[in-house]
Image (cartoon, rainbow, N blue to C red):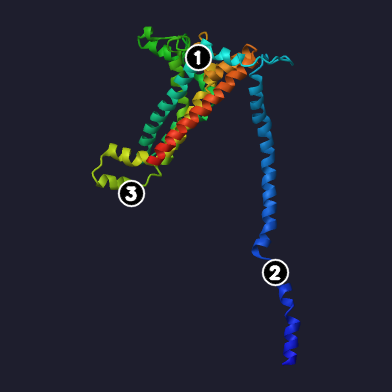
Amino acid sequence: MNGSTITEQRSAPAAPSAMRAAPTRRERRRPRFGRARWAMIAFVVPALAIYLLMVIVPSLQTVQLSFTNWDGISPTYDEIGVQNYTEILTSGRFWNAVKNTLILGLGSAVIINLISLVVALMLDRLNHAMGFFRTLVYLPALVSAFIMATIWKYLLNYNFGIVNSMLRDMGLPTWARDWLGDSGIVVWVLLFIICFTLGGNTTLIYLANLQSVPQELVEAARIDGAGGWKVFWNVTWPMIAGAVTVNMTLAMIAGWVIFDQVLVLTTGGPGFVSETMAFFIYKVGFGEYRAGLGSAAAVVLFVVVIVSTVAANAYMRKREIQA
């Protein structure tokens, strides 16, 4: 017994050291997680630094310059308070740009979503060649807005454009118009071109959501006697509410900052008739060398985009929850 007791006493202190020598799973993983975390930070920091230098800092500087009379070239400028904002809000040219932006921005957002939803519903019903037609619908979105606007500029040329040439060949010479030079229709022509260009992405988003709608719910509604419209309104529409929110938000943001089409097709003309808020900022800041006034207009546009987008998104999210 004494021998066994001594053996036990000698072997007893070894247990804690053995326990300390065996690291737990958390202790083994901690160094690996630490290295991974530092690696992720190393990848994020350069992009974050570039974003701060190229976006955040210039944005803050824009707010500062909006209270000055800087011309965009001179190394010096004077502080003039809110004079730029006063001039903007009392300028008929600026309010015309606001009106055009509302027509082109909100109008294109609504029209694009309606047309894209209808096209997506038709594509969803196809049993053959869906890939071909899906590619065909998406093709305009692959071309940049600048190139697409250039193509339309030649198509709508008054003298040799294919649109007016076809009208003359069909014996309708009086229908030929200066589509991009007539102040009465130029904004609506721009609206048509914008809707034609920006519909591809919206259609694919709707189509992806339509194909994720559970067919069990659709079949159950049909068994209960619901027609095509009732099935869509009570089953399909609530299920694609998220896609409607995303598409409307993206279309509104794109509509508020329409620039390429106006620059290529009309350069804001005739006169200032077709200017948008984004083109107004460019023209005043870089064309008229009034960077202070252009900065103030940019701040106003930023506030309008943020407020309208947040409000619309909140409303549509609320409708999503109710659905």
- For label 2, the residue is 22
Residue at 70 percent of width and 14 percent of height = 78
- Badge 3 element: helix
Residue designated by label 1: 95
Q: Point out the residue furthest to the top here.
A: 174
Nearer the observer, 117 or 89: 89
66 shown above or below 25: above
User: Would you place residue 98 above or below residue 227 in this image?
Assistant: above
Q: How many marks?
A: 3
Q: Which quadrant of the rendered structure holds the C terminus? A: top left
Q: CA distance from mark 3 to mark 1?
A: 51 Å
- For residue 269, which numbered disc appears in the image? none
Quadrant of res 196: top left
Q: Secondary structure at mark 2?
A: loop
The residue positioned 33% from the left and 42% from the top of the image is 235
User: Would you say 90 lies left or right of 2 here?
Assistant: left
Say which quarter of the image contains residue 60.
top right
Quick one: label 1 or label 2, which is nearer the N terminus? Answer: 2
Q: Which residue is label 3 attached to?
A: 216
Extreme residue in the front direction: 81
| 33 is higher (above) or lower (below) than 193 | below
Disc 3, disc 2: CB below 8 Å?
no
User: Is 192 displayed left or right of 34 in the figure?
Assistant: left
Q: Amino acid at mark 1?
A: Trp
